[in-house]
């Protein structure tokens, strides 16, 4: 027999083929303009971390699509890369320095950045190693890092062009600010959480009559030091007489106006709110509408600055809160303090409460018309409205349009050291020169009449800026490269819904503006990967699963250690341990990459979150074992036989009917089902329904090929004519070889390993890898409804015989004679297979119904159409009559109970509909069983 291991052991196979594929360069793209192109961009994971389950799911989808199109002969390119992740990476390195008792300021910018690069080189390969473990067939020759020199040049080039077009500007705006990082942060990095807080009611005296006052409600009393107005609703009769007057701000003594604005909720608090434009986004919008001054009272470290009274300067914001409240109480102006639930914005990187801060930042003007008369935002809106970019599922278009319709200018500067430093230089008088390098900046300065010293902007760009450019920066833009011509737009972007705003929309804006093309044709939006109970996976919650642990397995002790490290609340460790021990009492077994990938594919339902249960992995590991064993069986049937005996024609020969081959109904049936499966798979790939693809393959391989055809083919080879034997062998090989190609995009490792054994025997052209073999295409002319109907009837007959065995409670090892009469043509055509699958010792056919009835007296019988049959077994008639009589009595009692319940109007009217329906179902089931028992008693002559 061809040497193949007795059992499927994924680890060695994965290691061998991952390396072999890379050596063969299977993932490197062809650049043939005559071929269709397929391209997909990997959403670049942060270089700081490791792949989590969301990454693994996302990449399984992308790899399946990539392998599918590569096998279909497309120019295929999957571009991998990692993101420099400005804030996240800087935090990691700063914490390492803190452990050594030093800060980045001790090192200085240049040395600190060198330190970050050093760390990146050490840890940056972790993700690429994990991608290889998953079997990702990316083009490593096109791998990028967002701070590579070539991508950095594109960052600078686009910045300069946008600035020269008036679409990048510097201005003072309100931004999210992390006081620990001392930088602005993007909206994506802010996580709002409901927390227990307080609502303070503070009294502000009127300036023209101190005996009169207003009471404001606030959750942040310390910010009153920066108030520039008090606000009421214009239709609130209680306060209409105050509009236009002034209040004297306690502690500061400043006079601020009472204004009217419909933003105020009349029913919240007292209906009067304070306005602090420099520290609240809503107040900032109010200030712009009313022309209010904006007074910042905090430093970047969230301590009180010199705009506040001297007694508060230098205080931390929360200490300042205590002092302000105490002073209001001392002045008799603290009216009340209430418990209050509020949404607290925290930076996802540090956990610190984010402070809205007014600061000088760089912005991309998203709604300002460019030279072509359209804004960046409008181009992005038009790209989707025209259908040039399509969302899958399409309901995400509404989310996209809602955000784009309310888009604000994009703050792109960060007060960090790690990242793309903003290409702007300042003169001593505040002159600004944006240039591609310092030499160009000096030339621009000289042309403007400035010859003094230049100082480069210390800020870096938001990480999302460089990420927004990857659809074209990774393909060689601004040069006109073959990759740019072939692969822009890319075919599909596979991503989560949480970054539609922050990445998808910005890629569309940037790509349409700089290239005149959309970045991608389809945006496939998938849900989040949650744990088995529907909770978000998080290290801080102790419920994460590591995809590599599912591939390799992990012992319980190591898993517990992983899950209890880094908990947000260390006191939850015992509960985390208990839940983990309950879910994984023996740890996690090694499922292998293929089982994990098949699980992800099967769960890839459009737009829905995924509750990941490792039991699914176990089921698909069993599927891999089934496929492995089926291959061993097929190889056993052809071991040592030449091509003629295998029924395989020479390579490249027309695979049509051959005189030396006799294809039975079973052969034609399995080939027919294979065509239908190929159609379902093609449709699944076209619609991004990998769950349909996985289901179609699973159902065909397990339920039809393994459970039925292998058993039928075994009898055909054992007892058929030589032509039927050759037909069966050929069908076994050709169907199996096709299945391996069909399943390869989902489960690449096992299919590659098995294909190496099967393909040569099946007469397929010798090839180095299944990854480059042609993908199966359905041949509708091979769909055979007659053969399908024939085998469907045969399967019904086998199932009916199995049911009779069950009724007789016959041991699986015991074989009984089958007695049949009527239309026995089906039985005659499939006698050998029927005996094998129904475990029948022999088949006796009766021409006369009376003779059959006499021979089968007292035993359960069945009927299919005009065919009657029974399994012959010696029965103790008296004992069987007694047993059936007792069963009939029991069933009649149950029927009477159900009828009494359902005849009670009170029960039917008042019980839940589901309960009533359940009782009706019970009545139907009992009645059907009673009829069957009565029929059996009648056959026994009772």
Image (spheres, rainbow, N blue to C red):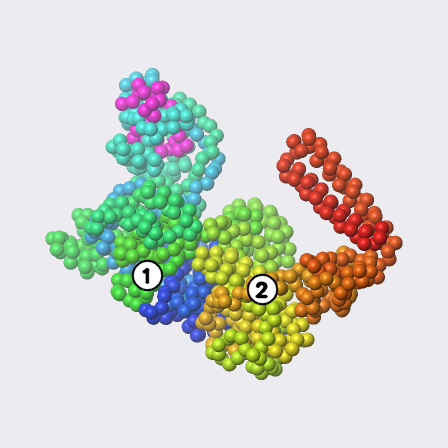
Which of the 4 image quadrants contains residue 190?
Answer: top left
Residue 114 location, quadrant: bottom left
Q: Position of residue 775 (x, y in %)?
A: 46, 68
Measuring 50% from the left and 67% from the top, which residue is drawn there? Answer: 781
Residue 96 visible to an observer of this rendering = no
| Front in this rendered view, residue 410 or 679 | 679
The residue sitting at 45% across, 71% down in the picture is 774
* Image location of residue 67, percent across then percent down: 45, 66
Whole-percent x, y for residue 380 in the image: 31, 50
Task: Identify the residue shown where x is 52% and y is 62%.
Answer: 676
Packing grade of label 2 (10 A; few <14, some 14-19, many >=20) is few
Q: Residue at x 52, y 78 (%)?
A: 763
The stretch in magenta equals: 215-244
Q: Classify residue 417 as left or right of residue 653.
A: left
Across and down, in percent, residue 98 comes to 42, 53
Q: Quickly name the residue at label 2.
A: 786
Relative placement, left or right, of 405 versus 542 is: left
Q: CA distance from mark 2 to mark 1?
A: 47 Å
Q: Is residue 343 magenta?
A: no
Which is more toward the observer, 779 or 629?
779
Classify mark 1: residues with Cα within 10 Å, few (<14), some (14-19) or many (20+): many
Which numbered disc covers residue 342?
Answer: none
- Of the 4 image quadrants, the one containing the N terminus is bottom right
Whether residue 484 is visible here, answered yes or no, is yes
The answer to whether the residues at label 2 and label 1 have Cβ atoms under 8 Å apart is no
Q: Is residue 253 left or right of residue 681?
A: left
**Which quarter of the figure has residue 70?**
bottom left
Per the image, the residue denoted by label 1 is: 488
Q: Is residue 921 above or below residue 470?
A: above
Q: Residue 807, relative to residue 757: is it above or below? A: above
């Amino acid at each position: 027999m061809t040497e193949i291991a007795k059992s499927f052991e994924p680890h060695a196979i994965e290691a061998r083929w991952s390396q072999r594929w890379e050596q063969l360069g299977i993932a490197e793209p062809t650049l043939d303009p005559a071929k269709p192109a397929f391209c997909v961009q990997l959403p670049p994971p942060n270089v700081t971390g490791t792949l989590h389950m969301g990454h693994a799911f996302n990449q399984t989808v992308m790899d399946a699509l990539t392998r599918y199109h590569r096998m279909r002969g497309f120019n295929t390119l999957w571009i991998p890369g990692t993101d420099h992740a400005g804030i996240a990476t800087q935090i990691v390195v700063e914490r390492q320095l803190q452990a050594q008792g030093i800060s980045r300021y001790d090192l200085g910018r240049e040395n600190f950045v060198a330190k970050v690069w050093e760390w990146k080189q050490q840890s940056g390969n972790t993700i690429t190693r994990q991608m290889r473990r998953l079997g990702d067939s990316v083009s490593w020759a096109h791998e990028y890092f967002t701070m590579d020199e070539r991508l950095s040049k594109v960052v600078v080039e686009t910045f300069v062009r946008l600035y020269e077009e008036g679409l990048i500007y510097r201005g003072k705006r309100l931004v999210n600010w992390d006081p620990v990082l001392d930088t602005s942060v993007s909206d994506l990095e802010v996580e709002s959480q409901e927390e227990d807080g307080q609502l303070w009611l503070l009294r502000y005296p009127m300036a023209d009559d101190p005996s009169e006052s207003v009471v404001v409600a606030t959750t942040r009393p310390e910010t009153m030091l920066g108030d520039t107005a008090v606000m009421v609703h214009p239709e609130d009769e209680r306060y209409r007489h105050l509009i236009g007057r002034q209040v004297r701000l306690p502690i500061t003594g400043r006079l601020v106006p009472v204004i009217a604005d419909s933003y105020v909720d009349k029913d919240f608090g007292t209906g009067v709110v304070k306005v602090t434009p420099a520290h609240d986004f809503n107040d900032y919008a109010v200030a712009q509408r009313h022309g209010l001054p904006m007074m910042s009272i905090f430093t970047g470290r969230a301590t009180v600055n010199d705009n506040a009274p001297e007694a508060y300067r230098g205080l931390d914001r929360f200490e300042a809160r205590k002092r302000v409240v105490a002073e209001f109480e001392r002045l008799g102006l603290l009216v009340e303090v209430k418990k209050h639930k509020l949404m607290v914005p925290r930076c996802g990187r540090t956990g610190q409460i984010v402070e809205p801060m007014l600061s000088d930042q760089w912005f991309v003007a998203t709604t300002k018309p460019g030279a072509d008369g359209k804004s960046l935002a409008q181009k992005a809106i038009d790209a989707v409205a025209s259908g040039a970019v399509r969302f899958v599922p399409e309901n995400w278009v509404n989310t996209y349009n809602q955000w784009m319709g309310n888009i604000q200018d994009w703050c792109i500067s960060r007060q960090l050291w790690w990242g793309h430093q903003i290409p702007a230089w300042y003169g001593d008088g505040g002159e600004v020169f944006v240039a591609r390098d310092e030499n160009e900046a000096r030339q621009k300065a000289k042309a403007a009449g400035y010859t003094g010293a230049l100082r480069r902007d210390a800020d870096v760009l938001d990480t999302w800026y460089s990420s927004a450019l990857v659809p074209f920066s990774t393909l060689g833009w601004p040069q006109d490269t073959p990759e740019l011509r072939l692969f822009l737009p890319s075919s599909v972007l596979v991503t989560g819904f949480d970054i539609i705003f922050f990445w998808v929309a910005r890629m569309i804006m940037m790509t349409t503006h700089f290239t005149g093309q959309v970045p991608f044709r389809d945006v496939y939006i998938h849900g989040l990967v949650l744990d088995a109970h529907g909770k978000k996976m998080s290290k801080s919650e102790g419920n994460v699963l590591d995809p590599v642990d599912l591939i390799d397995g992990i012992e319980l002790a190591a898993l517990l250690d992983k899950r209890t490290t880094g908990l947000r609340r260390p006191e939850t460790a015992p509960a985390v341990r208990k839940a983990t021990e309950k879910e994984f009492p023996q740890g996690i077994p090694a499922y292998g990459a293929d089982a994990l990938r098949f699980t992800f594919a099967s769960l890839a339902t459009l737009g829905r979150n995924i509750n990941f249960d490792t039991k699914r992995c176990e089921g698909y590991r069993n599927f891999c074992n089934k496929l492995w064993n089926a291959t061993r069986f097929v190889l056993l049937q052809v071991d040592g036989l030449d091509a003629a005996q295998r029924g395989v024609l020479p390579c490249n020969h027309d695979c049509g009917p051959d005189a030396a081959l006799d294809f039975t109904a079973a052969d034609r049936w399995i080939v027919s089902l294979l065509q239908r499966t190929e159609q379902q798979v093609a449709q699944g790939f076209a619609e991004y329904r990998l769950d349909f693809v996985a289901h179609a393959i699973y159902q065909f391989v397990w339920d039809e090929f393994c459970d039925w055809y292998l058993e039928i083919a075994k009898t055909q080879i054992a007892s058929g004519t030589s032509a039927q034997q050759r037909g069966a062998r050929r069908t076994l090989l050709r169907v199996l070889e096709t299945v391996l190609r069909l399943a390869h995009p989902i489960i690449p490792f096992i299919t590659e390993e098995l294909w190496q054994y099967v393909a040569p025997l099946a007469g397929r052209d010798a090839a180095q890898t299944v990854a480059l073999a042609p993908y199966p295409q359905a041949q509708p002319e091979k769909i055979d409804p007659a053969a399908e109907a024939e085998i469907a009837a045969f399967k019904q007959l086998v199932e009916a015989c199995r049911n009779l065995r069950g009724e007789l409670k016959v041991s699986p090892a015991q074989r009984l004679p089958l007695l049949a009469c009527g239309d026995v043509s089906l039985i005659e055509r499939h006698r050998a297979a029927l005996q094998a699958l129904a475990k029948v010792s022999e088949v006796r056919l009766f021409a006369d119904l009376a003779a059959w009835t006499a021979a089968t007296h007292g035993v359960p019988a069945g009927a299919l159409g005009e065919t009657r049959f029974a399994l012959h077994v010696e029965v103790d008639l008296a004992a069987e009559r007694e047993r059936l009589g007792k069963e009939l009595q029991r069933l009649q009692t149950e029927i009477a109970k159900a009828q009494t319940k359902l005849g009670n109007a009170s029960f039917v009217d008042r019980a839940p509909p589901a309960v009533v329906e359940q009782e009706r179902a019970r009545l139907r089931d009992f009645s059907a069983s009673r009829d069957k028992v009565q029929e059996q008693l009648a056959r026994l002559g009772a």
